[in-house]
């Protein structure tokens, strides 16, 4: 909402119903800082009710939505019918392409940093073992000193048939189903809910590393939104790019290599809105445009200079004090 405010707009802000408190505190801070109360309106509620009403309201001309591709499609249909401007930031399945000449320690550090960012590592066979064993060892150590939560996302609903403190969420079920055992993936570490003191209440899932993942598997194609890393073997950089581009999403990709020619060639071939070279896929720079292609977005960008085009209108003004009609450039004197 900040670029919208900077462009002089008033904003109606609806956070995800699962996490309302942070948004509430943010608006309180804005009001305390002196922002006029009528400039930001905070609305809580379910997306299917409150969000739907906001999108369909005739006096809301611009909509920015972050959430699932399925919901974005519904919003897109409504905005198209009502001639509203729409920016979508939806799903993603970010891939790390690790080549044979890569700095493997740097790649491993990047994989651990984006452990909950729906990652997949695409690697040649000669470095596959180094990547998988390194991730397995590091994630085992990380799991011993911490824990990873399976947080609800828009559309997730608790299982209300169970007592409140035991209710799982639909996202937890997605993670459990997404480890790919039924498709032949090999679970090297994790692949289950943790047990122990302090883990009884809440939705937690062990850091998971999968080997034997092939292009086209559900775990390679779909978002998981959990600490699950899939390792996919490829024979060349071209094959790695093809694996990345075969996914329906196109938010972010990363390439680890020391070959500058290969890196610059891949920049044009990787079908994602953002490409990182020797860096993880979640290190977005705040001053650069953020967004993706295909089923990740609809062409607009959040952040950077491009976002101001979305939240503003171009108005052309022509003023003439000559007192004489100026003909169009294609007209000639008679």
Image (spheres, rainbow, N blue to C red):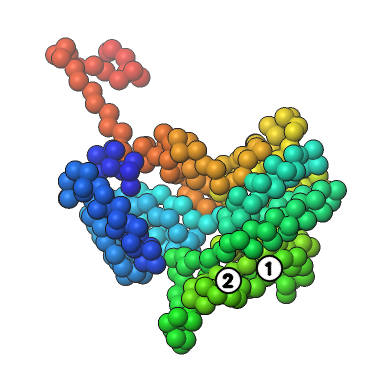
Residue 217 visible here: no
Q: What residue is at 53 percent from the left and 65 percent from the top?
A: 149
Residue 179 lies, in percent from the top left, at 67, 68
Q: Residue at x 71, y 52 (%)?
A: 121
Give percent across and percent down for residue 159: 47, 81
Left or right, 166 with respect to 194, comes to left
Residue nearest the viewer, comparing 209 with 60: 209
Crowding around mark 1 (Cα neighbors within 10 Å: few <14, some 14 to 19, many 20+) is many
Viewer-closest of 306 and 194: 194
Name the residue rendered at 47%, 49% in the picture: 298
Q: Is residue 100 above or below residue 193?
A: above
Element under disc 2: helix
> Gap in Å between the C-alphas at discs 2 and 1?
15 Å
Image: 177 above or below 273: below
Residue receiving disc 2:
174
From the viewer's side, name the closer residue of 241 and 150: 150
Pointers 2 and 1 in contact (C-beta within 8 Å)? no
Residue at the disc numbered 1: 190
On the picture, is 276 further left or further right than 188?
left
Q: Earlier in the sequence, mark 2 or mark 1?
A: 2
């Amino acid at each position: 909402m900040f670029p919208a405010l900077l462009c002089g707009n008033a904003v109606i802000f609806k956070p995800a119903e699962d996490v309302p408190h942070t948004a509430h505190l943010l608006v309180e801070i804005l009001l305390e800082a002196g922002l006029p109360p009528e400039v930001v309106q905070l609305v809580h509620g379910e997306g299917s009710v409150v969000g739907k009403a906001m999108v369909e309201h005739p006096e809301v001309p611009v909509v920015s939505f972050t959430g699932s591709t399925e919901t974005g499609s519904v919003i897109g249909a409504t905005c198209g019918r009502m001639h509203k401007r729409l920016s979508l930031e939806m799903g993603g399945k970010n891939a790390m392409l690790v080549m044979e000449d890569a700095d493997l320690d740097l790649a491993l550090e990047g994989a651990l940093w984006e452990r909950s960012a729906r990652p997949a590592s695409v690697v040649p066979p000669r470095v596959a073992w180094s990547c998988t064993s390194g991730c397995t060892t590091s994630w085992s150590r990380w799991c011993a000193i911490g824990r990873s939560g399976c947080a609800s996302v828009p559309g997730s609903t608790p299982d209300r048939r169970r007592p409140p403190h035991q209710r799982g969420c639909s996202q937890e079920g997605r993670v459990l189903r997404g480890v790919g055992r039924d498709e032949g993936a090999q679970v090297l570490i994790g692949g289950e809910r943790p047990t122990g003191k302090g883990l009884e209440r809440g939705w937690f899932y062990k850091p998971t590393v999968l080997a034997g993942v092939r292009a086209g598997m559900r775990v390679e194609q779909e978002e998981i939104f959990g600490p699950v890393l899939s390792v996919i073997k490829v024979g060349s950089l071209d094959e790695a790019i093809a694996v990345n581009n075969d996914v329906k999403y196109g938010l972010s990709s990363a390439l680890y290599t020391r070959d500058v020619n290969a890196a610059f060639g891949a920049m044009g071939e990787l079908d994602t809105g953002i490409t990182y070279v020797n860096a993880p896929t979640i290190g977005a720079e705040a001053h650069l445009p953020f967004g993706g292609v295909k089923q990740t977005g609809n062409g607009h960008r959040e952040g950077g200079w491009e976002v101001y085009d979305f939240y503003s209108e171009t108005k052309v003004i022509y003023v003439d004090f000559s007192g004489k009609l100026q003909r169009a450039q294609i007209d000639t004197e008679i």
